[in-house]
Amino acid sequence: MEKKRNNRIHQIDEKGRVAIPVNLRRQLRFGETLVLTKGIEKCIFVFTQDEWEKFLERVKDFPLWDEEKRRAIRYISGEAEEVEIDGQGRILIPGHLLSHANLDSSCFFVKMPRWFEIWNPLTYAEIHKPENINFREIPL
Amino acid sequence: MEKKRNNRIHQIDEKGRVAIPVNLRRQLRFGETLVLTKGIEKCIFVFTQDEWEKFLERVKDFPLWDEEKRRAIRYISGEAEEVEIDGQGRILIPGHLLSHANLDSSCFFVKMPRWFEIWNPLTYAEIHKPENINFREIPL
DNA sequence: CTTTTTTTCTCCACTTTTCCCCACCTTTTA
DNA sequence: TAAAAGGTGGGGAAAAGTGGAGAAAAAAAG
């Protein structure tokens, strides 16, 4: 029986709340607001307010009459939600993002350069088997 | 077990009223008038009065002898309606906009840079599947 | 014009969701 | 091994969302 010392997998309770792992939480300022948005794959992107605003700044002047760009902007930012971290270090994940990421009772936290991600643990494992990854051009 | 905690999907009642989600409503000033207009896709664009006037300002000097531009302006602004937010945070959606966006009993709210949008949830989901979106130029 | 009918507006009541606690168990740290 | 910190669950008050009744206003009919 697998010991459950895995600080990246956390439980999502009935109310949709999940505790952010301490090691990620330590990278946040106290009381910081986070922005949750639809990930490009079946996951949730979690930005700090600062990073999110940098992104918005970058797309500020995109021409929204262009259908492709408009839809892409809408995909990324249209369903974004600001959430506060509660007294127990938890966030409340909105229902529409839970269902996008196919999340139910537990989730997996992943660190990325400018944000972190919340995945269904099974979906994540499936996609990120080493034999499924192409490392060409990764400048190690 | 799918719970229906989805704060972006709201019910449209018999009278055509719908509550604006709090997180969007918080971005509005109290008692603010909104401008609803025909969206470029099958949706309704919702501007604050201010943003709407900025838009009108930008198209003020468009050459209306140009048929393409004349029709585009007419499309966007010709059927616009001002609506007030009622005591319960709801707006009344005019019938011609309901039918343009193919709305019946429920709708989905989407945030865009200078306005927000009201969609039929099914229409929205259909168009915004990740495989239908071109993310190439999104500077994440 | 007045009366009747329809539509719109305003308010009230009920249900669901969110927010803010506290309690408790587990894991890490000293 | 004890103390502190992290993670999980739940109760209850407050806020958000929803439906409907009745008043007011507008439109239609006589």
Image (spheres, coloured by chain):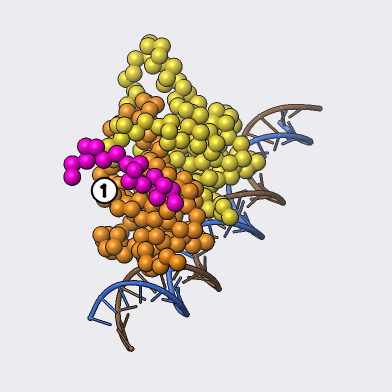
Chain colours: A orange, B yellow, C blue, D brown
Magenta stretch in the rendered image: A122-140
Marked residue chain, label 1: A
Q: Give the secondary structure at mark 1.
A: loop
- Dividing the image into 4 quarters, which one contains the C terminus of chain B? top left
The structure residue drawn at horizontal position 56% and vertical position 54%, both measured from the top left corner, is B3
Where is residue A111? Give x, y as percent.
30, 53
| Front one among B69 and A60 | A60
Can residue A57 be seen in the rendering of this structure? Answer: no
Displayed quadrant of residue B98: top right
Where is residue B49? Give x, y as percent.
41, 37
The extreme left residue here reads A140
Residue denoted by label 1 = A114
Where is residue B45? Give x, y as percent.
46, 33
**Amino acid type assigned to the residue bearing label 1 in the image:** Arg
Q: Is residue A66 left or right of residue A53?
A: right
Q: Is residue B98 left or right of residue B73?
A: right
Q: Is residue B83 left or right of residue A31?
A: right
Where is residue A118? Give x, y as percent.
39, 52
- Dividing the image into 4 quarters, which one contains the N terminus of chain B? bottom right
The structure residue drawn at horizontal position 26% and vertical position 40%, both measured from the top left corner, is A135
Displayed quadrant of residue A54: top left
The structure residue drawn at horizontal position 51% and vertical position 33%, both measured from the top left corner, is B126
Is C30 placed above or below A75 here? Answer: below
Can residue A109 be seen in the rendering of this structure? Answer: yes
- Say whether residue B123 is magenta: no
The structure residue drawn at horizontal position 47% and vertical position 28%, both measured from the top left corner, is B41
